[in-house]
Image (cartoon, rainbow, N blue to C red):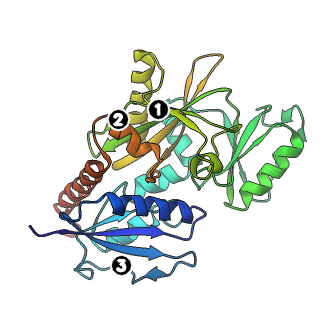
Amino acid sequence: MTKLRVAILYGGRSGEHEVSLRSAESIMAAMDRHRYEILPILIDKDGRWRPGAILPEPGANPGIDVVFPALHGTFSEDGTVQGLLELADLAYVGAGVLGSAVSMDKHVMKRLMAERELPIVPYYVLRRGEFPFPISDTGTTNGLGFPVFVKPANLGSSVGVSKAKTGDELCKAIRFAAEFDQKIIVERGVIGREFECSVLGNRDPIAALPCEILSSREFYGYEDKYLLDQARTVLPADLTSEQTAEIQRLAIECYKACECEGMARVDFLMESASGKVFINEINTIPGFTSISMYPKMWEAAGLPYPKLIDRLIELALERHRERRATRYSR
């Protein structure tokens, strides 16, 4: 049997470079070597491609059948790499240019959720150098009160994210987030539970059973996700059948609203006082490390890690065949 030649893109210039290395390592270790010829392509922190770059020209990359981007964050998960792969006319795993770009920008994603009347936490947006003066320990002119979460708009894995309980902490959190992006999101803090839900598919996506994240710290941050190995997960989450169905419905609605394909993980908050569920964010290239929840949720649903990789590659090839039927000239 002729092996399918799969290029694994990993590394990248973003603050999630190290996470990408771990994702790619796990993916390559799980791939069936009898079925695939694996072609690792590392993008270093300076943006150099090793052993060589993919050329943005149809037919110029004859040694590649499909690309699996195991990249996270800026210059990779935001539509930039996907645009290159479209120019090269290569099949690739995951969301396209539009889905990647709007999902990556938390502000744009929230606007899409609001348009579809999907539940999101109250928030406001700042640009680098702007501050929501006056700030006091009772809140800001935007009326959110404390606590609030401060995030770079275009990054993942909780890089640059802080929780602020006072005006001084908010100022520090804004400056910290501004180191990672020009646009900053400030959200009302939700006291409650955190959930994640994996979505898989192109035109007819399906959702796995959600899991609950029990952080070992004040919130589920970078250290908890990738370094400490102390956070606990409950899979499937301890929810009523109605709550489970609602999270799955919202995950699929979010996925569709952002024009996603292939895969995504949708994160949720459930407020303890009201029981209300909020869509927090969507990740189009979720972590694929040995402890990442995206593959774990599908494994719990009966789709083991190697078969999940097979399915993602199948979805990439299906989409590429469909797009090739499109005329781009008269």
Q: CA distance from mark 1 to mark 3?
A: 37 Å
**Mark 2 vs 1: CB contact within 8 A:** yes
Q: Is residue 97 visible?
A: yes
Q: Amino acid at mark 2?
A: Ala
Q: Residue tagged by mark 1?
A: 211
Whether residue 260 can be seen here: no
Q: With respect to residue 104, does 75 lie above or below?
A: below
Q: Nearer the viewer, residue 22 or 75?
A: 22
Q: Earlier in the sequence, mark 1 or mark 3?
A: 3
Q: Residue at x 23, y 65 (%)?
A: 33
Q: In the rendered structure, are the residues bearing label 1 and label 3 in contact, judged by CB atoms less than 8 Å apart?
A: no
Mark toward the start of the polypeptide (2 vs 3): 3
Identify the residue under disc 2. Answer: 300
Marks 1, 3: nearer the viewer: 1
Give how far apart the Cα atoms at labels 2 and 3 are.
Answer: 35 Å
Left or right, 11 with respect to 38, comes to: right
User: Which of the two marks, 2 or 3, is nearer to us in this view?
Assistant: 2
Mark closest to the chain's N terminus, 2 or 1: 1
Q: Which residue is mark 3?
A: 54
